[in-house]
Amino acid sequence: MDKNIAGLEPKTLWKHFAALCSIPHPSKHEEGVRNYIVNFAKEHGIECHVDSIGNVVLRKGATPGYENRKGIVMQGHMDMVPQKNNDKTFDFLKDAIQPYIDGEWVTADGTTLGADNGIGGAAALAVFEDLKEHGPIEALFTVDEETGMTGVFELQKGLLEGDILLNLDSESEGELYVGCAGGVDVISHIPVSREKAAGGYRWYEVKISGMKGGHSGMEIILQRGNANKPMARFLRKAVAELGVKLASIDGGDVRNAIPREGVAVVAVPESGCGRFEELVSKCGKVFASELAATEPELTFTASVCDGRNDYMTDESAKRVIAAVIASPNGVVRMSDAMEGLVETSCNLGVVKTSDSEVQFISLPRSSVDSAKEAVADQIAAVAELAGGSAELAGGYPGWNPNMNSPILHTMKELYRKLYGKEPEVKAIHAGLECAIIGSVYENLDMISFGPTIRFPHSPDEKVEIASVGKFYRFLEETIKAAPEK
């Protein structure tokens, strides 16, 4: 296992990325990365500002001969999605990511890599360190992008001075993104009543695992399974046919990653344990067959576990299970304007049981704001029908494409000169901070691009080494080619 990623080219970029991997930085815990950036600025004599929410801005004046160029802001986020394989012992608040070279890619040992958006941040730092010809440049590093875009929501006017924003948070080299989907978090609360556990039951822990998960925007089109859905289908049968009692159902960790694993704890009548285990085996085969193309490693098992003091009443269990089954999930509608683009989707990202309720966290996305609102209404209606309620939080708009963008024209021409082919111009079915930044700085000309990253938000995340070099060269040449004011 070759772990010497700092030896890759371009060396300065990979040096910074290796350093970022060594610093724990899940969402809402970016202070280590922020300190790294601030110390970098001090070491290199770069102007640095930290705002009240914790965003960092670096600023450097133009080099001789470039004073009349438009100012460019490089932008990315400091946090990463913390996901690990079930058999991996890892503390995202304390442990360093363990990146290694796997053929043509860099990946991590059993966890998310943090290339989303660590490569973008490392590239911005490398530009400040290495680039000798440029107009006015800035870099904006935001906090908490992955769990609510808190940093850009708190972004104040007057912090940025540039005219052009280069968002470095896209994941397919050779593609220029000029639009994105908006989203909103929908948190549903289904209250439950409990009763004291009776005798004559055997306790089981039911698990679904081995699923791929992934980014709930970028990879929703791949039709991967959501662990919460088959688990609820199984529980519906087990409760109705065998009189099983449900103590808890839990699946998924964050609202913007497709759930890969789920766990339910149930009490099974002693007389029905044989039939219960047969039902587990039968459903496991059904789920594996249904999802054979996308989830070849899916496993569905049950094992005897320690008993608990109580479980949900039958009425509560039925409402919870029905709500999971009925909640929207997956692709809702494809775009009429751009072939192959998802217009509207929803990810049932988290199901979490407490003593008094089961909470669902869903993330509807759409490039059409009214369609996003319609899915949110559907989720709320399901919660209400199940005797609960829903609240909306963290809503953000989409980013409407500007096909007449001057920087888009410049970058298309430049890419053609560098690599001999036309870059693809696209919109993305994911939330980019451009949408919110553009609502604060309305005159910014914006483009998003990046290297090739596969399976972000999952432990399979990897970044293509060659694409990082191409992305970084393109970034440097774009900055040098900034239009005149």
Image (cartoon, rainbow, N blue to C red):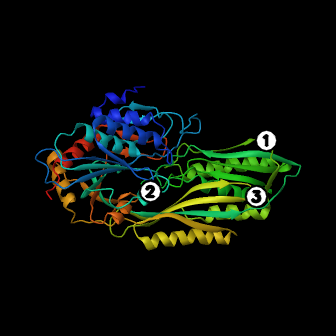
Q: How far, Cα to Cα, is label 2 from label 1?
A: 38 Å
| Residue 421 visible, this angle | yes
Residues 462 and 234: in front is 462
Mark 1 neighbour density, 10 Å: few (under 14) some (14–19) many (20 or more):
few
- Three-letter residue code for mark 3: Val
The kind of secondary structure element at disc 3 is helix
Mark 3: few/some/many CA within 10 Å (<14, 14-19, 20+): some
- Around disc 2, counting alpha carbons within 10 Å, would you say few (fewer than 14), some (14 to 19), or many (20 or more)? many
Residue 360: image x %, image y %? 61, 59
Q: Label 3 near label 2: C-beta < 8 Å?
A: no
Residue 434 in the figure: left or right of residue 287:
left
Q: Is residue 352 left or right of residue 307?
A: left
Q: Real-space Cα distance between discs 2 and 3?
A: 33 Å
Asked whether residue 104 is in view, the answer is no
The residue identified by callout 3 is: 239
Q: Position of residue 287 (x, y in %)?
A: 60, 51
N-terminal of the two: label 2 or label 1?
2
In the picture, which quadrant includes the C terminus? bottom left
> Which residue is more in the foreground, 213 or 339?
213
Kind of element beneath mark 2:
loop
Q: Which amino acid does label 2 sit on?
A: Gly
**Percent from the top left, x then y, of residue 449?**
30, 51
Whether residue 416 is situated above or below residue 374 in the rendered picture: above
The type of residue carrying mark 1 is: Asp
Nearer-N-terminus badge (2/3): 2
| Rendered view: 239 above or below 418 | below
Residue placed farthest to the left in the image?
Answer: 65
- Mark 1 lies on residue: 306
Of 120 and 61, the residue lying toward us = 61
> Dividing the picture into quarters, in which one does residue 226 lie?
bottom right
